[in-house]
Image (spheres, rainbow, N blue to C red):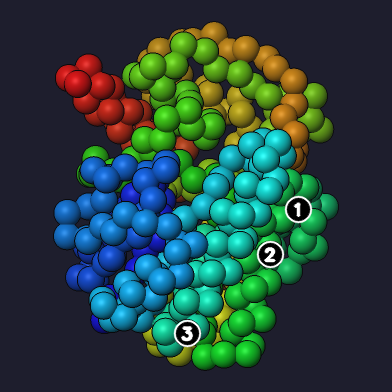
Amino acid sequence: MAVLVTGGAGFIGSHTTLALLDRGETVIVLDNLTTGFEWAVPEGAKLIVGDIGDADLVKDIIKTHDISSIIHFAGSIVVPDSVTDPLGYYLNNTVKSRTLIASAVECNVDNFIFSSTAAVYGMPEVNPVSETANLKPISPYGSSKLMTEWMLRDTAAATNLNYVALRYFNVAGADPSGRAGQSTPKATHLIKVAAEIIHGPRTNISVFGTDYSTRDGSCIRDYIHVTDLANAHCMALDHLRNGGDSDIFNCGYGHGFSVFDVLDAVKRVSGVDFPIHLDARRPGDPAELVASSAHIREQLGWQPQYDDLELIVAHALAWEEKLNTLRIAS
């Protein structure tokens, strides 16, 4: 029996594939390589290039490889882009997820783990925000993910499919051993962008909004190391395999850093100063978004190992330096 990882050639998907392989799982990766990379799929996993919206392909993969669990990462993730292209986001994140879920049900897949997002909370009234907070997404990205959560909830109530939805906060860092990292061109993640200033092709960085009602006027986010997040997926899989109920869990550390905090950390760790451009707010950005992680700690026993902003930055910088060496060599 095997695990199907959709979007396994991307940032979080490749790290979770590594974590699964490290514990002896058989892993099949399905990725259309729109934003992922063939070389990012770890040795030991089988890559199939294709789209999750291709129901015939998905069902063939499930039957051929005896898939018992699906971990679903494939989708579009840039909040501002979702504001300008809502239909594209509803297609990639909602319509195609519906096709994937239907294929899973038809082929009797037992377990489904979904890559959701803290964007489902919109602008929470209280931080840290818990899973029971009101869900008021303010971007099509958040809405597209919430719709998939609803589909999973209703499908689990009507079928034998069990699911866990993991609501990510701000994912950063890279594999501590240097096997994987964030490689997407034109990425918008703050730490990735700052790492490209130090080691990569980028020459400027902007702070979007300095007039928020936060301690320094910039947005505050909960930054989680990608390896801790990958381990959360493995624990969610164990939870379902052991007969655990379908559930939803926040994935964050429970404390936040401002944009200026993060940029200062990058400067300290790298030893490099760089100019910062102050820009207007972006649409769809809440002032503060910090996770309450009590539920995942209590129910799954999740204990993060990399809850240190400077360590997250150091791993991201090390990966960016490796990428830059590859760029120069090519």
Residue 300 on image: x %, y %: 47, 74
Tell me the quadrant of the picture where the C terminus can be found. top left
- Relative depth, front residue between 203 and 307: 203
Q: What residue is disc 3 on? A: 106
Q: Residues within 10 Å of mark 3 (few under 14, many from 20)?
A: few
Question: What is the CA distance from the residue labelled 1 to the residue labelled 2?
Answer: 11 Å
- Residue drawn where x is 27% and y is 45% of the image: 38
State the CA–CA distance, disc 1 to disc 3.
31 Å
Amino acid of disc 2: Met
Near mark 2 (Cα within 10 A), the count class, few <14, some 14-19 or many ≥20, is some
For image coordinates 39% across by 16% down, the residue present is 201
Query: Which of the two marks, 1 or 3, is nearer to us in this view?
Result: 3
Q: What residue type is labelled 3?
A: Glu
Tell me the tag on residue 147: 2
Percent across and percent down for residue 168 are: 55, 54
Q: Which amino acid does label 1 sit on?
A: Pro
Query: Mark 1 vs mark 3: which is more N-terminal?
Result: 3
The residue that label 1 is drawn on is: 137
